[in-house]
């Protein structure tokens, strides 16, 4: 079992979108896949309720017992943890489960959003300080700004990642309509529009994430 925790203390960065789409990519790659929705808002659970295909399972765990319960799912190849967007005991427990795999932190490509991510890096540092070995990665998500603004955000994020032993992934995911349409149908963009730009971005991100484990 490999665990991929998708988390950022800041809300609205597309954690559920990435979790669901990466899970679909993994299922299409022949993996047995589970999403654990640890956000009381339940976005991944709602997505699964619309889904007809049975190749992605979703379970809701919205208590800090997720740290212990994560080990009950070792019959899955990949477990994605869709973490909630607020700093509380549940969020911190979800981050700790990344000790079974990796932590992926989605970040919006603007200076303000990069600075807001510092809180999540601090929570990561606290988890590491109590002995949790957590490899951590950041990825730009919902990118929609001009190249110059993205470059400025990248410069700011690189400084933060270097200071906090976090790796910035090469992949970027855009703010595309296909993600919204796919979500409403319980699909991933690889199923909804397999030749679209959104699908290509998820393919590249999935390959980059899986290469970390290899």
Image: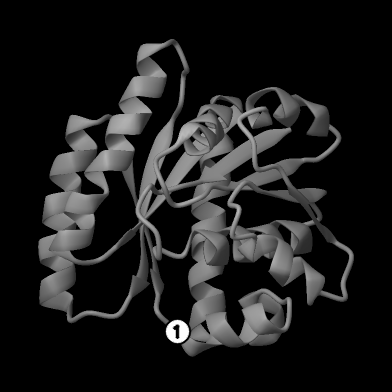
Is the residue 178 above or below the residue 110 in the image?
below
Can you say which quadrant of the picture contains the N terminus? top right
**Residue 166 seen in render:** no
Q: Is 46 positioned to the left or the right of 99 in the image? A: right
x and y percentages locating residue 104 in the rendered image? 45, 46
x and y percentages locating residue 204 in the rendered image? 50, 63
Residue located at (82% from left, 49% from top): 32
In this view, the residue in front, 46 or 35, is 46
Q: Is 37 positioned to the left or the right of 16 in the image? A: right
Can you say which quadrant of the picture contains the C terminus? top right
Q: Is 132 positioned to the left or the right of 59 in the image? A: left
**Residue 135 seen in render:** yes
Farthest-out residue, top: 131
Mark 1 residue element: loop
Residue located at (64% from left, 60% from top): 42
x and y percentages locating residue 98 in the rendered image? 54, 32
The mark total stands at: 1
In this view, the residue in front, 52 or 23, is 52
Q: Which residue is mark 1?
A: 176
Is the residue 167 above or below the residue 184 in the image?
above
Residue located at (64% from left, 87% from top): 193
x and y percentages locating residue 67 in the rendered image? 63, 26
Task: Tell me if mark 1 has few (under 14), some (14-19) or many (20+) residues whose alpha carbon lies within 10 angstroms of its own.
Answer: some
Q: Is 173 positioned to the left or the right of 18 in the image? A: left
Is the residue 107 above or below the residue 168 in the image?
below
How does the figure colour the protein chain or chains? one colour
């Amino acid at each position: 079992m490999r665990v991929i925790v998708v988390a950022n203390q800041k809300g609205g960065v597309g954690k559920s979108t990435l979790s669901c789409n990466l899970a679909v990519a993994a299922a299409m790659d022949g993996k047995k896949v589970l999403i654990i929705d640890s956000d009381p808002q339940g976005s991944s659970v709602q997505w699964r309720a619309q889904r007809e295909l049975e190749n992605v399972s979703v379970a809701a765990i919205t208590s800090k017992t997720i740290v212990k319960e994560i080990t009950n799912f070792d019959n899955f190849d990949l477990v994605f943890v869709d973490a909630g967007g607020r700093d509380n005991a549940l969020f911190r427990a979800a981050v700790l489960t990344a000790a079974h795999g990796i932590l992926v932190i989605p970040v919006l490509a603007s200076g303000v959003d990069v600075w807001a991510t510092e809180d999540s890096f601090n929570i990561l540092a606290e988890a590491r300080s109590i002995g949790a070995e957590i490899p951590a990665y950041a990825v730009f998500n919902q990118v929609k700004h001009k190249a110059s603004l993205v470059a400025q955000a990248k410069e700011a994020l690189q400084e933060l990642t270097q200071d906090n032993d976090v790796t910035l992934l090469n992949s970027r995911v855009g703010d595309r309509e296909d993600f919204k349409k796919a979500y409403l149908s319980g699909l991933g963009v690889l199923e909804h529009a397999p030749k679209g730009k959104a699908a290509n971005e998820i393919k590249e991100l999935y390959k980059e994430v899986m290469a970390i484990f290899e």
